[in-house]
Image: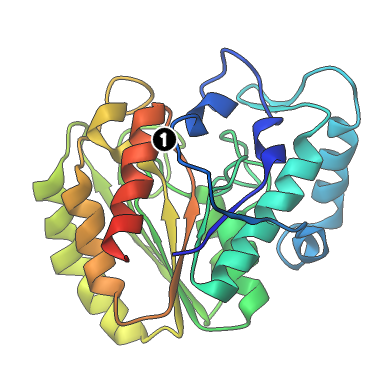
Amino acid sequence: MELFFHPMFLKHDAPGHPENAKRLSLLKLDTYTEAKSGEKYLERVHSRDYVDMVRQASAAPALAHLDPDTYVNQYTYEAACLAAGAAVQAAEKGGFALTRPPGHHAPFGGFCIFNNVVIAARATGKRVFIIDWDAHHGNGTQALVRGDEKMMYFSTHQSPMYPGSGLESEGNAINVPLQPGAGDTEFLAAVDAMLKPALAEFQPELVAVSAGFDSYYKDAGMLTNMRLTAKSYEAVCELIRPYKRFFVLEGGYNPESVRDGVEAVLNFFK
């Protein structure tokens, strides 16, 4: 599976913040395809006012905040445009975009700048099923795809927890809130009972995975308390094997979680 990355992702950084460049420090990045800017795709998903706000905030030389949780520095706008572009390239090539900053809360904060997975899905023009196994509910993704007949969103996430949404399914969003401490047993039950039939019914042309590894057991006790192992991620990979697919990195705040999770996906599709 082709990896899409850009060194600029590491310059969007705020030491001491959970979403920092060290998240990717254990990944093997000897071979990757360099991301291209996806700036031209942003306004297919985000308003011009929102894009301009991010651009202007990032133009300041000092660290600034879009909200109390979401920072920007002088490299953020360029890094976020490249992250969107990496997701588009991954969608086109069936790869894995190792994006920073992440995106599934955008445009509503939560460390996220642009909603990379929705930008990529819309750029393809295809019928896309988005699976989000991040420990947080992707409130931004759900809001952006609401009412779009070519899109379906499925999220498993810890609840109660930020952002407090995703308590029930609505429209083209299937939400499966899981109790703190949930592991493979609970996750795989949701896959069998809800994801499998939804995927079969929707019959997507493309499957997108918002791959957040803060649901991994090594991230428990940091920002979240889920305890999935590679077994859960591999089960989803097996389910979507018959479809064209791509992956976009979301959360995961222990570098070991990101390394182990990415490697589980890459090893599955060797």
- Label 1 crowding class (10 Å Cα cut-off): few <14, some 14-19, many 20+? many
> What element does badge 1 sit on?
loop
Q: Amino acid at mark 1?
A: Gly
Residue for point 25% across, 63% down: 236
Q: Is residue 99 left or right of residue 236?
A: right
Q: Nearer the viewer, residue 187 or 149?
A: 187
| Quadrant in the picture for the C terminus | bottom left
- The location of residue 139, given as percent across then percent down, is 50, 49
- The location of residue 225, given as percent across then percent down, is 26, 28
Mark 1 — residue? Answer: 252
Is the residue 143 above or below the residue 79 in the image? below
- Can residue 147 be seen in this snapshot? no
- The location of residue 260, given as percent across then percent down, is 31, 40
Q: Is residue 115 left or right of residue 179?
A: right
In the picture as drawn, the residue positioned furthest to the front comes out as: 30
Residue for point 53% across, 45% down: 30
- Can residue 68 be seen in this snapshot? yes
